[in-house]
């Protein structure tokens, strides 16, 4: 079993303070404790890792981190500089603030331009950051309604610029249905961000890892599988290329 990362640890913290069991769809499935897929289709042994100039902050809306179908963990699977926190309306975890004020990082909130105040610095499709700092992309992870609430009610994020990405296609994540076509899974957004910052291999690697997760997840819940059966082969070729 691969070592635990920030999202795994956050999941354990969140479930330890639950007053009742969280019931996900497919509740009868015996899940791997890390990838959260049916154990017989576990992908942990295939988990890739890669170096990136970027870091990521995953800011979760309450019980989102408990959902097996959540894709934020796929980012942490691959990139070691991924931080994960539960969003709180009235209190902000000190560890989150410490990351945001760390001078080695240049925080950028990823969110659609339509919801950004006119005077706020905004990058469209291509982020920019100082050469002496690393970009730290802040992803608000929850339902679309929850993400909008986090964006509006997090004043400590207001001082950071926003990156707005334009999706080239509708979400390929068919495990969970988006309410609007432009809404993407968290891992899909991160993949686009990596490609936009000229890390095309990392973007493709994360996108392929996402495809494999989606395909194997559907195998486990015994529904009609509309995922990509070629994803494992594509991932193998990408990771082989890294080893050569």
Image (cartoon, helix red, strand yellow):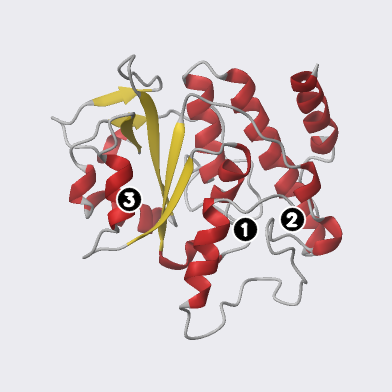
Contact (Cβ within 8 Å) of mark 3 with mark 2? no
Foreground: 150 or 237? Answer: 237
| First in sequence: mark 3 vs mark 2 | 3
What residue lies at 37% left-to-right and 21% top-to-bottom? 127
Q: Does label 3 or label 1 sit earlier along the sequence?
A: 1
SS at mark 2? helix
Residue on which disc 2 sits = 217
The residue carrying pointer 3 sits among few (fewer than 14), some (14 to 19) or many (20 or more) residues within 10 Å by Cα, namely: some
Image quarter of the N terminus? bottom right
First along the sequence among labels 2 and 1: 1
Q: Residue furthest bottom?
A: 19
| The quarter of the displayed image where residue 239 is located | top right
For the point 86% across and 61% down, the residue is: 40
Residue 118: percent from the left, percent from the top? 15, 31
Q: In the rendered structure, find residue 173 and report the number of the disc placed on it.
A: none
Is the residue marked by circle 1 packed among few (<14), some (14-19), or many (20+) residues within 10 Å? many
Question: Residue 75 at x, y = what percent?
Answer: 57, 41
User: Where 195 falls versus 93 (above or below)?
Assistant: above
According to the picture, the residue beneath numbered tag 3 turns out to be 96
Q: Is residue 226 left or right of residue 187?
A: right
Alpha-carbon span between mark 2 and mark 1: 8 Å
Residue 223 visible in the picture? no
> How many angstroms separate mark 3 from mark 1 (CA)?
24 Å
Tell me if residue 206 comes above or below residue 124 in the rendering: below
Instruction: Name which residue lies at 25% across and 63% down.
Output: 89
Give the alpha-carbon distance from disc 3 to disc 2, as whole Å: 31 Å
Give yes or no for contact between labels 2 and 1 (Cβ–Cβ under 8 Å): yes
Assign a secondary structure to mark 3: helix
Furthest-left residue in this view:
119
Residue 69: which disc?
1
């Amino acid at each position: 079993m691969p070592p635990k990362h920030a999202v795994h640890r956050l999941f354990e913290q969140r479930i330890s303070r639950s007053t009742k069991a969280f019931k996900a769809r497919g509740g009868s499935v015996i899940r791997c404790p890390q990838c959260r897929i049916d154990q017989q289709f576990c992908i942990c042994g295939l988990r890739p890792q890669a170096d990136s100039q970027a870091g990521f902050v995953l800011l979760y809306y309450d019980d989102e981190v408990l959902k097996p179908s959540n894709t934020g963990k796929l980012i942490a699977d691959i990139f070691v500089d991924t931080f994960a926190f539960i969003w709180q309306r009235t209190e902000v975890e000190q560890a989150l603030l410490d990351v945001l004020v760390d001078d080695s990082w240049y925080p950028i909130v990823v969110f659609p331009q339509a919801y950004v105040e006119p005077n706020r610095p905004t990058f469209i499709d291509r982020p920019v950051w100082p050469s002496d700092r690393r970009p730290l992309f802040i992803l608000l992870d929850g339902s679309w309604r929850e993400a909008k609430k986090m964006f509006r009610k997090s004043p400590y994020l207001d001082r950071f610029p926003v990156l707005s990405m334009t999706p080239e296609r509708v979400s390929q994540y068919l495990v969970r249905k988006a309410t609007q076509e432009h809404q993407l899974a968290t891992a899909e957004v991160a993949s686009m961000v990596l490609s936009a910052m000229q890390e095309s291999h990392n973007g493709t690697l994360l996108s392929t890892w996402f495809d494999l997760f989606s395909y194997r997840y559907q195998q486990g819940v015994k529904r009609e599988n509309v995922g990509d059966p070629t994803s494992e082969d594509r991932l193998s070729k990408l990771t082989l290329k890294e080893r050569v």
